[in-house]
Each structure stands twice: as C-alpha cells, then as structure tokens.
C-alpha cells in the first residue's frame, strides 16, 4: 500500500493499491485529486462498477492501471483532459459497449492495454496509428473484426504487438517489417490467411512469434529462418508445410517450440535443441520422418516433449537418459522400434508417459515405481513382453493404464487393484491370466 503526497502542498500525487484484495467501487470523488499523477488499482479482482467520468478531472495523470478487476459498463471517454497519460491499462475487466476508439487521441501513450474485455464487435480503429510513441499494444480479446489496419504498421517504436483472440481476417501485411523494434508478436487465435510474409525477417530482435490457431499456409520463409533471438515459436493449428529450417537447429535462446497440427514434413533438424535451453516442444500431427531428434533435452530443462502422429523411426536416443524433468512424454503413433530404454521407466517428474502405437520391444522395468507422479501410462499397440511388474501397483496417482495389444504374459498383478484413482484400464490382446 502506497499513497504519496506533495511535500509542500500535501496534495495526493500517487495512489498505488495493486493486489490488495480491495472491494467496492471507484468513487467519483477521485476527480477531486487534481494533482494525481499515478493511480494503480490493478489486480484486485473484486473492484466492480463503472469508471467514474470524474476521473478525467485528474489532468496530471500519467499512469492509470485498473486492470484485472471486475469493472463493468462502457469505458468513459477520458481523452479530452488526460493529455499527460503515458500508460493506460484497463485490461481483464468486464467492460462492454463500443471499443474505446478515443484512445487514439492520447498521443503521449507509451503503453496501451485495453484487451480481455467484452466490447461490441467491430474493426480496429485506425486512430490507434496516431500513437507514435507506443511501445506496447495489447488488444487481445477485444472482439475485433476485419483486417489489421495499415496504420498500426506506422508505430515504429512498438516492441510488443498483441492482437490475439479476436476475429481478424486477411493476411499478415508485409508492412509488419517496418516495426524494427518488435520483440513479441501475438496474433494467435484469429482467422488470418495467406503466407508468413518474408518481411518478418527484418525484425532482427524478434524473440516471440505466436501466430497459432489461424489459417496460414505455405512454407516458413527463408528470411525468418535466419533470425537468431527466438525464445518462443508457436505456429500450431495452421496449414503450414515444408521443412523446419535447418538454421533453427542453431538457436541458442529457444525455450518453447510448438508446430503441431500442420503439414510440415521431412527430417527434423539434426541439431535442434543442442544449443538452446528448451523447456517444451510439441511437433505432433505433422509428417516428419527420419531418426528421432537426438538433442531436444541437451539442455536438461525439457519438461514437455510431444511428437505424436509423425513417422519418426529407429530408436529413442540414449541422450535422453540425462532428461530428469519430463512431465509429459508422448511419442505415440510413430514407427519407433527397439527396446524401450531404461530411462523411460524412472522418470520421477512424469505425469504422462505415452509410447503407444509404435514397435517397441522389451519389458516394463520395476523402476516404474519411481514415477510417483504418474497419472497416465500408455503402452498399448507395441511388442512388449514379460510379466507386468507388481511395482506398478505403487503408482497411487495413476488414472489411466493402457497395456493392450502387446505380448505380456503371466498373472495380472493383484496390486493393480490398489490403484484407487484408476478410471481406465486395458489389458486385452495379451497372454495374461487371473483376475482383479
């Protein structure tokens, strides 16, 4: 809690009450604080009601944060008197009515965040292009329609552009290459079409690119392949095709990579992950082939690895034995063969292990008992054999156990009956005896 006053006049200049679990409404009396330069009521969640128009009487206001509350109604026009405002954040509320196009009159804005509200559907006002000082633009979930206005691509100071979760159509304009300061592009969950423009390659500082959940097609442009500062690449749920650029195997900062449910093909870059601190990778439901990527866990940070529904062949590389933090490991539906390596069974952080629908051989190791966080174990449709170890009954969190269509033999271990959270169990297509 922080309220600051002018040391000479005693008038209130700053109110910072973010994340204080406050409730109630914003009083119209706020307008009497004519010397107020900063008002931060963000992240209280239970502040409700509307924004009083009297707030515009705080003509010295530079910083206004009302985000993450329960404010309702139409956002009043504050542009006439708040010429000094450089930060406006009213995101994550319940505002309705027309999109506040008047924000385009606040020419001093550096940060504008009005997303995650319930405005009427409509096009993005071109007047936002008047905000030439803007570095951060957050318009996610604003019910915006139509194409991205060209005026936005004149905001050459922009570092972050977030227009995700709207109803935008058309392509990503080539003019995006004008935004040379951009390090984050968030355009996911729209209806964008066409190809990724080669002009993206001009954004040499780009760290985050998320255009997932659109209708984009074509191949990854060569110009994009040479960018070196990527930390996040999300291209999933599109119609993109062709290979993954080999140069992306040299990325040194990449943490999250998701391209699932596209039409990518060919061999995956041999060095992918070798030089980067990968945290999560999902390349499922494409047409990748060749050997299983060897270095995805080279940085030993990997928690999520999904390669479902591709055509990777051969064995799981032994390099993954140093991967001790896997939470989700899913290689379902490839053409992988050979013995399942020992490192698969002893994953102490794993919640899901899915090696189903491959050609794996070998036995379930008693070391499976170390996987005390395991909730799902998918082993069906392989060539595994031997007895089911009693240790599997120690996996007290287990909810799903799929063992069907292998060559397991012997007695069904009664310890499986101790798995009180188990909701799905398949054992058919084996040579098992006994009952539960």
Image (cartoon, grey):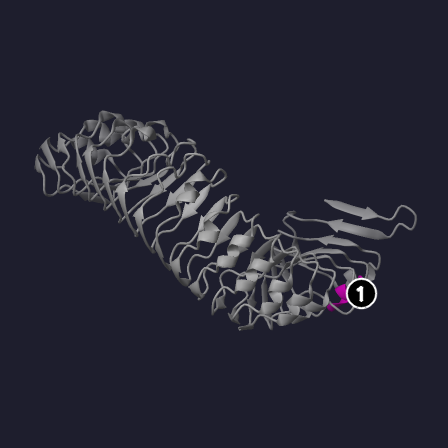
57 inside magenta stretch: yes
Residue at position x 41%, y 34% in the image:
274
Question: Mark 1 highlights which residue?
Answer: 57
The reply to whether residue 92 is in sight is no
Q: Quadrant of the N terminus?
A: top right
The span picked out in magenta is 53-58
In the rendered image, residue 178, in percent from the top left (x then y), is placed at 60, 59
Query: Mostly what secondary structure, the magenta segment?
Result: helix
Kind of element beneath mark 1: helix
In the rendered image, residue 177, in percent from the top left (x then y), is placed at 56, 58
Residue at position x 35%, y 47% in the image:
283
In the image shown, does 332 or 78 lie closer to the viewer? 332
In the image shown, does 45 or 328 lie closer to the viewer? 328
In the rendered image, residue 188, in percent from the top left (x then y), is placed at 47, 58
In the image shown, does 130 or 11 lie closer to the viewer? 130
Q: Quadrant of the C terminus?
A: top left
Left or right, 104 with respect to 379, comes to: right
In the rendered image, residue 364, in percent from the top left (x then y), is placed at 20, 30
Left or right, 229 with respect to 63, comes to: left
Classify 45 as above or below 123.
above
Classify 202 as above or below 346.
below
Classify 293 as above or below 8.
above
In which quadrant of the rendered view does residue 31 lie?
A: bottom right
Left or right, 98 with respect to 236, comes to: right
Residue farthest along the front direction in this orientation:
222
């Amino acid at each position: 809690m922080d309220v600051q006053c002018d040391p000479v006049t005693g008038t209130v200049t700053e109110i910072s009450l973010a994340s204080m679990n406050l409730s109630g409404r914003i009083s119209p009396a706020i307008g009497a604080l004519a010397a107020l330069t900063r008002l931060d009521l963000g992240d209280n969640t239970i502040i409700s009601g509307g924004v009083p128009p009297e707030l515009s009487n705080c003509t010295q206001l530079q910083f206004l944060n009302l985000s993450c509350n329960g404010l309702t109604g139409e956002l009043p026009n504050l542009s006439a008197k708040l010429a000094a405002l450089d930060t406006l954040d009213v995101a994550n509320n319940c505002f309705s009515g027309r999109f506040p196009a008047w924000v385009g009159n606040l020419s001093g804005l550096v940060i504008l965040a009005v997303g995650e509200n319930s405005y009427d559907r409509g096009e993005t006002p071109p007047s936002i292009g008047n905000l030439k000082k803007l570095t951060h633009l957050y318009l996610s979930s604003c019910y915006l329609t139509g194409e991205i206005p060209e005026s936005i691509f004149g905001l050459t100071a922009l570092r972050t552009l977030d227009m995700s979760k709207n109803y935008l159509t058309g392509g990503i304009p080539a003019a995006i290459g004008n935004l040379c300061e951009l390090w984050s592009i968030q355009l996911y969950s729209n209806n964008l079409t066409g190809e990724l423009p080669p002009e993206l390659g001009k954004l040499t500082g780009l760290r985050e690119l998320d255009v997932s959940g659109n209708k984009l097609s074509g191949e990854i442009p060569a110009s994009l392949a040479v960018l070196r500062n990527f930390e996040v690449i999300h291209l999933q749920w599109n119609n993109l095709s062709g290979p993954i650029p080999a140069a992306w195997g040299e990325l040194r900062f990449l943490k999250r990579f998701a391209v699932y449910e596209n039409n990518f093909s060919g061999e995956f870059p041999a060095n992918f992950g070798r030089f980067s601190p990968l945290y999560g990778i999902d390349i499922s439901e494409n047409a990748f082939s060749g050997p299983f990527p060897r270095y995805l866990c080279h940085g030993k940070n990997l928690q999520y690895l999904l390669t479902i529904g591709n055509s990777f062949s051969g064995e799981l590389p032994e390099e993954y034995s140093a991967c001790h933090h896997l939470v989700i490991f899913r290689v379902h539906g490839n053409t992988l063969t050979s013995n399942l390596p020992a490192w698969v069974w002893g994953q102490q952080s794993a919640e899901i292990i899915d090696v189903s629908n491959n050609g794996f051989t070998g036995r379930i190791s008693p070391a499976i008992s170390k996987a005390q966080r395991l909730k799902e174990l998918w082993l069906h449709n392989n060539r595994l054999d031997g007895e089911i170890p009693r240790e599997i009954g120690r996996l007290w969190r287990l909810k799903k156990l799929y063992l069907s269509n292998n060559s397991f033999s012997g007695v069904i271990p009664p310890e499986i009956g101790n798995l009180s959270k188990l909701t799905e169990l398949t054992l058919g297509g084996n040579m098992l005896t006994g009952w539960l």
